[in-house]
Amino acid sequence: MIGELSVYWWRHAGATVVVAEGALDPVSYGDLRVAVVKAAAELPRAVIVDLDRTGVAHPTALALFPAVASEIAVWPGVPLLIAVANEANHRILADYRMRQYLPVHRSIEEAMDCIADPPPRRVARTELPNGAASFDRAREFVTEWCGRWQVTTERTTDVLRVALELVDNTIKHTYGPPTVRVELRRGMLTIAVYDGDPEPVHLIEPGTDPVTGVEHGLTAIARLSRAWGSTGTQSGGKVVWAVL
């Protein structure tokens, strides 16, 4: 049936296996995309999509895999692999030349064996109170870890600005305590703020103080970051992240 696709996931030896059952087509592919992105946000070793129970009703829907692989490679830096023993689906993937974009394997175990060692990550994480005290706590936390990782003063200034804007956005628009995560990977610094509200954030219009002309909110984050985004999590909330 058009648009009918059931998606669930399970953890396996540090990776997350996302299983799709039903018809993959331009109507249903969004559900699979959301599941893969949410799985990656939990920082497994890799995300493996099991397509054995999937009927590829429209090959154009396969475009989601190269797109999502590129997206999660930026943040959170998690590889995406496909596992499928189904010969019909293998032929469809071969016709699409999927191996040009991401690895395709005959089984989940084969995919697991081919997961490359991840790049070295330095990660720190803390939960903040949902109130004004969050700002000082966030500032101290980010400053401490940038110092431990010998991040330059210039970069620390931008990281602090982004972190405080993210925390401010969370305090203003959600009710639960935010969690801040900082990461240094391949020379890139990432700030991520998790909360329990599933509503994604959007950059609707430039945010500038009418008196000072200073940018604020997502406008400032977008200018200071190489990339930023809002991603749902498997727990039902979201994470807003920025890569500097």
Image (cartoon, helix red, strand yellow):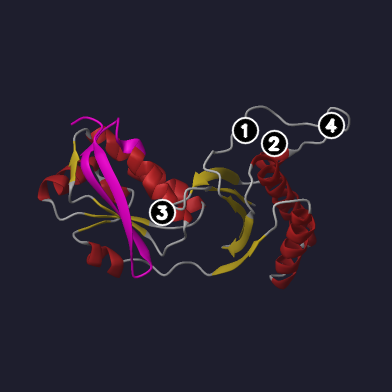
Query: Judging from the image, what secondary structure is the residue with disc 1 in?
Result: loop
| Residue indicated by mark 2 | 219
Q: Residue at x 43, y 47 (%)?
A: 70
- Label 2 sits on what residue type? Thr
User: Does the image show residue 133?
Assistant: yes
Whichever of callouts 1 and 2 sits on the residue coming sooner in the sequence is 1
| Residue indicated by mark 1 | 203
Query: Judging from the image, what secondary structure is the residue with disc 2 in?
Result: helix
Residue 8 higher or lower than 108, as above or below: above
Residue 28: x percent and y percent?
29, 35
Q: Quadrant of residue 156?
A: bottom right
Residue 124 higher or lower than 87, as above or below: below
- Rendered image: mark on residue 39: 3
- Rendered image: mark on residue 88: none
Distance from Cα at disc 1 to Cα at disc 4 = 18 Å
| Residue indicated by mark 4 | 213
User: How many C-alpha atoms fall within 10 Å of the one at disc 3: few (<14), some, or many (≥20)?
Assistant: many
